[in-house]
Amino acid sequence: MTNDDDFISRLIGFGLSEKEAQTYLHLLKYGPKTPSPLAKSLKTYREDVHRTLTSLIEKGMVRPSLDAPTVYTAVDLDTALEAALKKHESDLREMEVRKREIQELSRQQHFSPAPEMVTFKIIKSLRELVSVMVPTISKLEKGWDMVVPEQAIIFASQFGINPFTEAFIAEGGRVRVLLTDFSYASIPLVRELVQMGLEVRYLGQEGLVFTVFDEKISMSGINWQIRRFTGDQSIAALWTDDPSYAHYLLSTFEMLWQQAGSAEDRIRQLMEQGPL
């Protein structure tokens, strides 16, 4: 994963779209630009760039010049991130007000409750996986349980997932990791997870990939063949907020957790064998 990919993935996790993150990074690296050369550099249409710049201006991350032709400049990073945070806070306050107003109107109308709706979607790339996982981890309240292969802990390390996990644990959250496999090369990563406070066990049974957040949101791996750790690497995973499916996966996890061995025992075994 390149530094640019890493920077863009963090910006996406901060709430920017991929186009916004790419445009902002380009202006930071190469300086102020008008829309036409910017569109050429980003290999997109001028109208698309205009829409993205307008959105970045609203977020306080890009500043337009007053003269013609208009030149767009990236606001320095600290100021831009502060502006984005304030925009989120302002939007949240406004949404809270609207929520209370709608709830009051609902009570007055005496609506009949509708059946709970659930969502299913397919995650198609590592970049999209980051954009889904970071907000989910940031909202965790109780626990996070996962059955994952070695590739998943490499992904978490390289795409900046671990700091969010560590923050959740520091606030009293519980994270359990059941590794279906890991090699000698990944011993430092496994030990890092343990030091962060994650409970880690080793299953030694490849093929299973799933994770459950707060016993209500889940993600199951369909195709997890990762050949390179870049944002555009294709994967296939099913994400859903169906609590019944989450409970099914969690019951499977508990059964496997009892069967699994100690990660430290697996590490000792690999140390005795040495690197292959």
Image (tube, grey):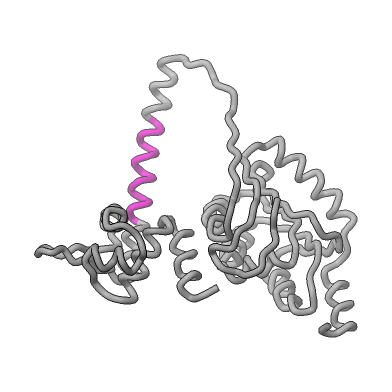
Q: Position of residue 175 (x, y in %)?
A: 70, 58
Q: Is residue 167 visible?
A: no
The correct choice, above or below, for 127 with respect to 264 in the image is above
**Residue at 32% over, 65% down:** 80
**Residue at 43% over, 21% down:** 106
Question: As rendered, which of 176 and 149 lies closer to the eye?
Answer: 149
Queried whether the magenta region covers residue 93, the answer comes back as: yes
Where, quadrant-wise, is the C terminus in this rendering? bottom right
Q: Is residue 40 visible?
A: yes
The correct choice, above or below, for 77 with respect to 246 in the image is below
Residue 37 is drawn in which quadrant?
bottom left
271 to the left or right of 24? right
1 to the left or right of 83? right
Question: As rendered, which of 202 and 91 lies closer to the eye?
Answer: 202
Residue 117 is drawn in which quadrant?
top right
Residue 128 is drawn in which quadrant?
bottom right
The correct choice, above or below, for 216 with respect to 27 in the image is above
What number of labels is visible? 0
Question: As rendered, which of 60 and 22 lies closer to the eye?
Answer: 22
Q: Position of residue 30 (x, y in %)?
A: 30, 76
Queried whether the magenta region covers residue 244, the answer comes back as: no
**Residue at 37% over, 51% down:** 89
Q: Position of residue 38 (x, y in %)?
A: 28, 66
61 to the left or right of 12? left
Where, quadrant-wise, is the N terminus in this rendering? bottom right
Q: What range of the chain is rendered magenta?
A: 86-100
**Residue at 24% over, 63% down:** 35
